[in-house]
């Protein structure tokens, strides 16, 4: 693995008297499929919010692709190449599937507002490029046949895929997936795992995901970091993490000798 694409050092955030993230250290190599797991309230989504600039840490350093990003706006971090999905789906329900994907391109548009209004050649060429790329993303995520349907009419699992498609429209180097398999049936989960692998293998996108489906995580991820009460209690390959006593005790509450489902 190469130089970490995302690196956290002593990352800490407090909400009043509660320390939600406590001196978190993270090295995410470029090109890795990685997981961030832990019980409810462990600080996982708070970490995602820190990484993407939605909240600012009280202490610590955070770099993305070698650049310090603490204090940068979420839009700027996205422009640098970090995209995310959300635990609670945030689509434009009244817009079509295609239009939801097209929205993802706007942060990277080079043409200005006047060019769009006047339909200048530069904007027209850029628009055609967006339409073509959106079609490719919909094909990749299996949503082509639904391109003209309102996003709000899609089944829950399809909406999850559409969130990933919209994130891909920003041309990310790193994508953060917050519980992407939530609400999916086993067949949909299998398809999602195949899609995530394609993101890395075909598009070269590094993936960091939060997920409560342990079988999904253990079969897909190459490296796993475990949080409990805002602290990193374990990290390693799936076979190491699933037998770690601290993980069994703090995350699963399993009896002695039990491990994480594989």
Image: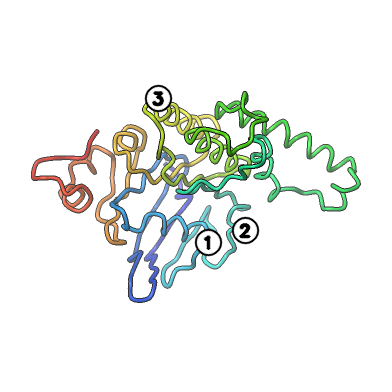
Q: Is residue 95 above or below residue 66?
A: above
Q: Earlier in the sequence, mark 2 or mark 1?
A: 1
User: Residue 232, position in %: x, y?
Assistant: 29, 57
| Quadrant holding the C terminus | top left
Point out residue 203 in the picture as x, y percentages from the top left corner: 55, 33
> Which residue reaches farthest bottom?
17
Q: CA distance from mark 2 to mark 3?
A: 36 Å
Residues at discs 1 and 3 in contact (Cβ within 8 Å): no
**Res 131 → quadrant:** top right
Color style of the picture: rainbow
Q: Position of residue 28 (x, y in %)?
A: 42, 49
Q: Residue at horizontal 45%, vertical 55%?
A: 48
Rate crowding at label 2 as few (under 14), some (14 to 19) or many (20 or more) other CA atoms within 10 Å.
some
Q: Could you tell me which secondary element the residue under label 3 belongs to?
A: helix
Instruction: Tell me: residue 63, above or below residue 220.
Output: below
Q: Is residue 209 left or right of residue 111?
A: left
- Specify the quadrant that holds the N terminus: top left
Picture residue at 53% right of the left edge, 37% below the top:
159
| Front one among 30 and 152 | 152
Q: Kindly indicate whether the residue at mark 1 contacts the one at mark 2 (C-beta within 8 angstroms).
A: yes
Pair 1/3: label in front: 3
Mark 3 burial class by Cα count in 10 Å: few <14, some 14-19, many 20+: few
Q: Quadrant of residue 120?
A: top right
Disc assigned to residue 76: 2
Q: Which residue is mark 3?
A: 187
SS under mark 2:
helix
Decide: few, some or many residues near mark 1? Use Cα within 10 Å; few <14, some 14-19, many ≥20.
Answer: many
Which residue corresponds to the image point at 18% horizontal and 42% vertical from the top-left?
243
Q: Check residue 202 in the rendering and tell me which mark sits there, or answer none.
A: none
Q: CA distance from mark 1 to mark 3?
A: 34 Å
- Residue occupied by mark 1: 53
Q: CA distance from mark 2 to mark 1?
A: 9 Å
């Amino acid at each position: 693995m190469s130089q970490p694409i995302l690196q956290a050092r002593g990352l800490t955030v407090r909400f009043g008297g509660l320390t939600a993230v406590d001196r978190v250290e993270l090295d995410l190599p470029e090109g890795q499929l990685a997981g961030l797991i832990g019980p409810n309230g462990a600080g996982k989504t708070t970490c995602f919010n820190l990484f993407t600039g939605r909240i600012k840490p009280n202490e610590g350093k955070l770099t993305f692709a070698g650049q310090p990003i603490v204090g940068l706006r979420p839009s700027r971090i996205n422009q640098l190449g970090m995209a995310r999905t959300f635990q609670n789906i945030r689509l434009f329900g009244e817009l079509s599937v295609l239009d939801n994907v097209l929205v993802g391109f706007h942060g990277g548009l080079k043409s200005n507002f006047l060019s769009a209004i006047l339909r200048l050649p530069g904007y027209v060429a850029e628009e055609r490029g967006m339409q073509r790329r959106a079609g490719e993303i919909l094909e990749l995520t299996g949503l082509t046949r639904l391109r003209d349907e309102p996003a709000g009419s899609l089944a829950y699992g399809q909406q999850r895929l559409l969130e990933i498609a919209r994130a891909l429209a920003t041309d990310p180097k790193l994508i953060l997936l917050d519980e992407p398999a939530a609400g999916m049936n086993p067949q949909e989960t299998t398809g999602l795992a195949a899609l995530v692998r394609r993101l890395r293998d075909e598009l070269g996108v590094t993936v960091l995901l939060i997920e409560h489906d342990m079988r999904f995580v253990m079969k897909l991820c190459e490296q796993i970091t475990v949080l409990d009460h805002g602290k990193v209690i374990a990290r390693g390959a799936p076979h190491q993490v699933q037998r770690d006593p601290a993980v069994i005790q703090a995350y699963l509450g399993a009896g002695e000798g039990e491990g994480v489902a594989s």
